[in-house]
């Protein structure tokens, strides 16, 4: 279940601090973050996950019962508040590292994946 360079990892969380922490964690280990909208129906989310061949979704207990074709990593929200830290190898992907994959509504009504590189995020800051 390891995350390799630019492995897409879904994040099924409502907007907030947990979502930001999850995105940063994925980036620090070299993955690509795919934020998902928790209000979307499962069939639409399944299409997105299958389109990108995503095998791993970070979420919280309230969303783990969703019928999605991935393994789940359930975030323990108490751990997020803990001062303890784990030791993980950090990856520096450079400015061309694909940091995110976002879905647009697409012109056909089907979601379309759009890749974003680190340099695009840096220009926003």
Image (cartoon, rainbow, N blue to C red):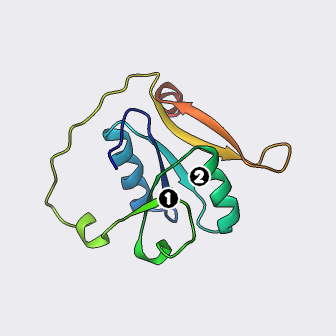
Label 1 neighbour load within 10 Å: few <14, some 14-19, many 20+: some
Q: Is residue 14 above or below residue 121?
A: below
Which sits in the foreground, 58 or 56?
56
Identify the residue at horizontal 44%, vertical 27% (top origin). Answer: 97
| View extreme (right): residue | 108
Question: Secondary structure beneath disc 1?
Answer: loop
Q: Is residue 14 above or below residue 3?
A: below
Residue 105 placement, left or right of 18 = right
Identify the residue at horizontal 34%, vertical 66% (top origin). Answer: 75
Disc 1 and disc 2 in contact, CB within 8 angstroms? yes
Question: Secondary structure beneath disc 2?
Answer: helix
Residue 24 placement, left or right of 34 = left
Residue 113: mark? none
- Where residue 41 appears, as percent x and y from the top left, is 68, 68
For disc 1, the marked residue is 70
Mark 1 / mark 2, whichever is N-terminal: 2
For disc 2, the marked residue is 49
Which sits in the foreground, 2 or 18?
2
Which sits in the foreground, 114 or 42?
42
Q: Is residue 40 shown to the viewer in this render?
A: no
Count the marks: how many? 2
Which sits in the foreground, 29 or 123?
29
Tell me where residue 31 sits by quadrant: top left
Identify the residue at horizontal 35%, vertical 42% (top origin). Answer: 3
Whole-angstrom CA distance, mark 1 to mark 2, is 8 Å
- Where residue 65 appears, as percent x and y from the top left, is 50, 76
Identify the residue at horizontal 59%, vertical 52% (top origin). Answer: 49
Label 2 neighbour load within 10 Å: few <14, some 14-19, many 20+: many
Q: Is residue 39 above or below residue 120?
A: below
């Amino acid at each position: 279940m390891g995350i390799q360079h630019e492995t897409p990892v879904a994040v099924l969380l409502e907007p907030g601090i947990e979502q930001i922490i999850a995105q940063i964690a994925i980036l620090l280990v070299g993955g690509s973050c795919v934020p998902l909208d928790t209000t979307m129906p499962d069939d639409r989310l399944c299409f997105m996950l299958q389109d990108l061949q995503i095998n791993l979704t970070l979420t919280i207990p309230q969303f783990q019962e969703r019928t999605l074709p991935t393994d789940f990593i359930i975030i323990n929200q108490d751990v997020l508040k803990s001062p303890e830290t784990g030791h993980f190898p950090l990856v520096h992907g450079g400015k061309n590292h694909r940091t995110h994959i976002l879905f647009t509504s697409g012109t056909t009504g089907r979601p379309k994946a759009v890749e974003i590189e680190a340099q695009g995020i840096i220009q926003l800051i």
